[in-house]
Image (tube, coloured by chain):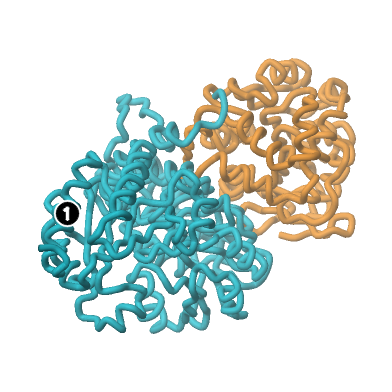
Chain colours: A orange, B cyan
Amino acid sequence: MKLQINGKSTFVSTGGRDFEPDGDVLLFLHGSGQSHLSFLLQGRFLANRGFQVLVPDMPGHGLSKGAALTSIEEMADWCATVILAAGVEGPVNIIGHSQGGLVAMEMARRHPAMVKRAVFIATALSIPVNDMLLDLAKNKEPKAIDAMMDWGHGPVGHMHDHTMPGHSHLAYGRQLMAANETGALFTDLSACAAYSDGPVAAALVTCPSLCILADMDKMTPIKAGRKLVQTLPMAEVVELSNAGHMLTTERPFEVNQALRKFLAK
Amino acid sequence: MSGNFKFDTLALHAGHSPDERHGSRAVPIHQTTSYVFQSTEHAAALFNMEVGGHIYSRLTNPTVAVLEQRLAALDGGVAAVATASGMSALFITVLALCSAGDHIVSSSQMYGANINLFEHTLSRYGITTTFVAPNDPAAIKAAIQPNTKLVFGEVIGNPGMDIMDIRAVGKISAQAGIPLVIDATFNTPWMIQPLKHGANIVIHSLTKWMGGHGAALGGAVIDGGNFDWGQNDKFPMLTTAHFGYQGVNLWEEYGPGAFAARVRTEGMMNVGPCLAPMNAFLILQGIETLGLRMEKHMSNTAKLLDFLSGHEQVAWVKHPSLPDHPDHKVAVELMPKGQGSIIAIGVKGGREAGRAFIENVQLASHLANVGDAKTLVIHPGSTTHSHLTPEAMQAAGLTEDLVRVSVGLENIDDIIADFKAALRIAGKVAGTKS
């Protein structure tokens, strides 16, 4: 569906089902340079299992208009606006991947009444970005995308062994990222690099939370994910083996199983 | 992983991980029509495209999926759909993009069945085609109409070997808001990956160089994922509610993979040109050595060209690598590793001399295929086009003396010896040899 957020047309996938704001709402938040499509194998699956699904494209990403948001805090406030614009009154389950996990933390800190449960997929207390990647994102975006797709995938992705018959993880990811507004990736990565409040924000996430981590994650290494688990007051953890940072597409069955188990509680 | 794998590695491995239960290193042949569901919920999820997996082999099959994923990896596409033949790949591509009243701009110099499909079959269903010279981008641009839904051509035309500059044509189609669909059968991704040069969709006949051994028919559609289907209202099949799958909007829900999803959920579902698992296996075996074979095809072609270009019984030689080919410059720019292993020659003495050459080669096989590991020859004037007048053949881009050679992988000395002997006999028939 399309919503007007801060005067800009915003695309929000509902997993192919009509959205009922009174239901048990899942708000998925994508990572740097990604879009709602990074939850291709979660949104539709959970929308057909009784959940009300919102998977927005952040401004400048996917099918949403507007300039990319420049800080994690601004993204958290934008998400709160999305929830209200969708007509949701009660608290929602926030599920963030990578940068989306930082936004979820900040949501829980800034808008605690809106957060029922939080899931952090391939996230850490901070996501430092090396200068080389930032420089590429600013000046040679296609090369930055290539690098992120390389580092972001584990053996399954690099072997093009997809659960969706005929698909390529790497090429799909590249085209997904290339479809965003030019500069959105640099803005996202800059926002991640600048965000240092993770330890404080995570300690204030008082709702039940789940961390889903991948053992071959090069972008948010599992050691960093475990520190997040230790900092969150009420965290469970699921660690997936033989998976990289893009575990939502590399290991969709396991991610969905972990989500269903946690959300059923 | 230490980085993105290179072409030869992908040709051997992409799309397949040894199965955990048996550890089979080779890709298993899943000779089955259907797949046992884990539960009713699992079945419903598969039918509703919520999860990946297999339902029925008309739609997907594990062996075929490995081939599809390998093809997507080699061409740089987001997804591939394998089909029973190259022709069915083309047909279901058009099916996904065009309806009655729509229009196609197509190369005029290409494989005869492609032309027949557009000119004689699709026209009966209200889809019209304007045929334009593939090496004339300005004419292609001028032929695009408001109802044009795609531009189609071959990088290397069959059999005339005209070259379409897909960089220029890709810009033209992009400006018009329509995709460039390329039949890449004659080049394979080893020579050029058209998606990196302006194409949006690639079609292969896998029967040719990809399989490479003349043992299995097959085709494929590769979705580049690099076309914005939502930029205009020309493609409602992708950007509005699907007739099935709870009315899914493929562009919104599948993004770069929307076109492949439509091909799968309409072309394969409603028409059903599925690839047999055994054929997928045979083609995979061929692809494992694609790089090695293509190198040898190119080197043998270069040596045979040297021989033919200086032969007294050969009136003319046509190949994109030769400086006198009208598209030589573009061909070398697009395909620096080699410009294909099809050679067209004119045998002095016209139709009868051509026939004599064909009937007297011993090593080369006289048949209607290309891209085999074995050297193949055909003389259209005495076979496929024997019913045509010289004038009609000329209009089709052919001449009476034309012999098409698909250069194989035999020792080049043996190929040359075979051709030398057959040309000598052709010369006697033509009266140029005593």
Residue lying at the far front in this picture: please name it: B434
Q: Name the residue carrying label 1.
A: B365
**Residue B263 appears in the picture as rendered:** no
- Residue B271, image quadrant: bottom left
- Residue A232, image quadrant: top right
Q: Nearer the viewer, residue B54 or A131?
A: A131
- At 70% from the left edge and 55% from the top edge, which residue is drawn? A20
Q: Position of residue B188 (x, y in %)?
A: 41, 49
Q: Chain of mark 1?
A: B
Indicate left or right for B133 with A231 as reference. Answer: left
Q: How many marks?
A: 1
Q: Position of residue A132 (x, y in %)?
A: 76, 28
- At 63% from the left edge and 31% from the top edge, which residue is drawn? A152
Q: Position of residue B46 (x, y in %)?
A: 45, 49
Q: Nearer the viewer, residue B213 or B423?
A: B423
- Residue B370, image quadrant: bottom left
Indicate left or right for A222 with A90 as reference. Answer: left
Indicate left or right for B357 with B31 as reference. Answer: left
Binning the other alpha carbons within 10 Å of mark 1 as few (below 14), some (14 to 19) or many (20 upward) gives some
- At 28% from the left edge and 42% from the top edge, which residue is drawn? B281
Indicate left or right for B110 with A193 as reference. Answer: left
Split into 4 quadrants, where in the image is the C terminus of chain B?
bottom left
Q: Nearer the viewer, residue B388 or A44?
A: B388
- In the rendered view, would you say A212 is above or below B274? above
Split into 4 quadrants, where in the image is the N terminus of chain B?
top right
- At 85% from the left edge and 40% from the top edge, which residue is drawn? A76
Q: Nearer the viewer, residue A229 or A184?
A: A184
**Residue B397 appears in the picture as rendered:** yes
- In the rendered view, would you say A73 is above or below B57? above
